Amino acid sequence: MAVISATELTAQLNACGVTKVVLALSGGLDSMVLLELLHQARQVAGFALQAVYVNHGLNPDADRWAGHCASACALRNIEFFSLQINIAGSGNLEAAAREGRYQALAPFIDTATTALLTGHHADDQLETLFLALKRGAGASGLSGMARQRPFANGYLLRPLLDCSRQHILAFARQYQLSWVDDSSNQNNHFDRNYIRNVIAPLLTGRWPAFTETTRRSMQHLAQQQQLLDHYTEQAMIRCVEGRRLHLAALQQYLPLQQDLVIRRWLAQFQLNPSSQWLQTAKQQVIAASPDAQPLLVLGQYQLRRYQQWLYLEQLREFPATCCRLLWDMQGCMALPAGLGALAVYNTAGPGRLAMVRSEVVVVFGQLSLPFKPAGQAQHKPLKQWFKLWQLPPWQRGQVPLLLADDRLVVVAGYATAFSTTQADCWLGWSQS
């Protein structure tokens, strides 16, 4: 497909309501063509335009490339920024450079009407497909780079994604553009370069339309993924409440969709489990006997089940039952083990419990203490109240217990022994 026109580019920006464009400018062929297109489009549309060069510190010519970008922007009266970042030399250098670049660009996308534009094109999309195949990706990965997606506070747009490098080169020559060539692009040690320099030429030499046909296949996969996402989101509404997932609701769906829901739920916490981990979770946690207390670790989290719920909990140390904290209730009290803080308020509010101001002792995990919430007829051991409140066993040691004269008077977040008519203040527990 030929390079889009400035008019078509303007239409894409208008469709997203974009008022400011930030171009990721490397000085290479693709980004220089996009720079010229944006320069032409701005003559008509009048959007704000900035160009940002990110120096990864990996190439000795990087400063020269920055100078080339600065000159090209000055010629077109485009605001230019040059950033320096540091990339660790171990691990996947390509991935680290890409991640570092996007992190550096994110602060520029500071409003909902700001878009970051990159020069990715159809040949890049083909390379992305092969990289996804290499790592065994699913439909989402095999659908390649999205033409448009949320980024920072605005959007990431790739307006050249349907354009071949051949047509981009023809555009550059037509407008007599100059660009820089990165010698590292010839280093076939990098996976993307090996695909670009060795594999892709063999395939397109045999089948000239290969890039175009694979692009259509990737679009089909992207559409199927959108459909999967839609139905998965609908299931999420029924099954998920924050850090817990309702198993009875989940079991109303086909096994494949159950997996998608679990994965989407975990992805909210930046967790991407292997297929083996997911299978173990289904066998050892979800399918465990009702009286079991199964536990499975994933990263800095643990997966647990209680009754008909799955819980995702951060790994943490709980306060010992011998922990005793004296509090005069004159200010906030920070709790140990990252359990948040207690605070006293003069007025009632959501989650606040009636309290009588006094010197108290805060303890944890003493489940045998007798307790009678206001309005209840009799005392019961605290562990029985926790069962009635359906609080999972492993969470019970995290709840602050307030003692006045060695008597349990408040179970923070749950119940108080004081009536509202007795109260002269209100207790709140903010959990981290």
Image (tube, rainbow, N blue to C red):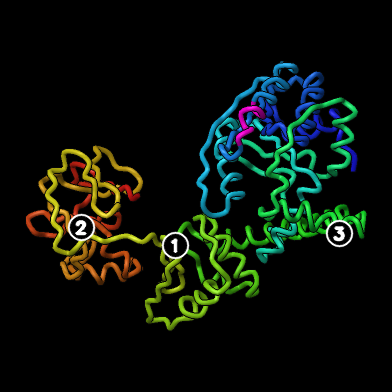
Task: Say whether residue 84 is magenta.
Answer: no
Residue beneath disc 1: 299
Are the residues at dot 2 and dot 1 in contact (C-beta closer than 8 Å)?
no
Q: What element carries label 3?
A: helix
Which comes sooner in the sequence, label 1 or label 3? Answer: 3
Q: Is mark 2 on a helix, strand or loop?
A: strand
Q: Where is residue 303 in the image (x, y as percent from the top left)?
A: 43, 68
Which comes sooner in the sequence, label 2 or label 1? Answer: 1
How dense is the environment of label 1, judged by Cα within 10 Å: few (below 14), some, or many (20 and up)? few
Q: Residue 278's mark?
A: none
Residue beneath disc 3: 203
Q: Where is residue 57 in the image (x, y as percent from the top left)?
A: 56, 37
| Point 90% across, 43% down: residue | 1
| Point 78% across, 52% down: residue | 197
Q: Is residue 119 visible?
A: yes
Question: Total number of numbered labels?
Answer: 3
Q: Say whether residue 283 is left or right of residue 188.
A: left
Q: Say whether residue 346 is left or right of residue 87.
A: left
Structural distance between the alpha carbons of marks 3 and 2? 69 Å
Query: Which one is in front in this view, the residue at disc 1 or the one at disc 3?
Result: 3
Which of 171/283 is in front? 171
Q: What residue type is labelled 3?
A: Leu
Q: Position of residue 274 (x, y in %)?
A: 56, 68
Residue beneath disc 2: 401
Q: In this view, does 45 lie above or below 301?
A: above
Magenta span covers which residues?
60-66
| Point 21% across, 66% down: residue | 377
Which comes sooner in the sequence, label 3 or label 2? Answer: 3
Query: Which one is in front in this view, the residue at disc 2 or the one at disc 1?
Result: 1
Structural distance between the alpha carbons of marks 1 and 3? 40 Å
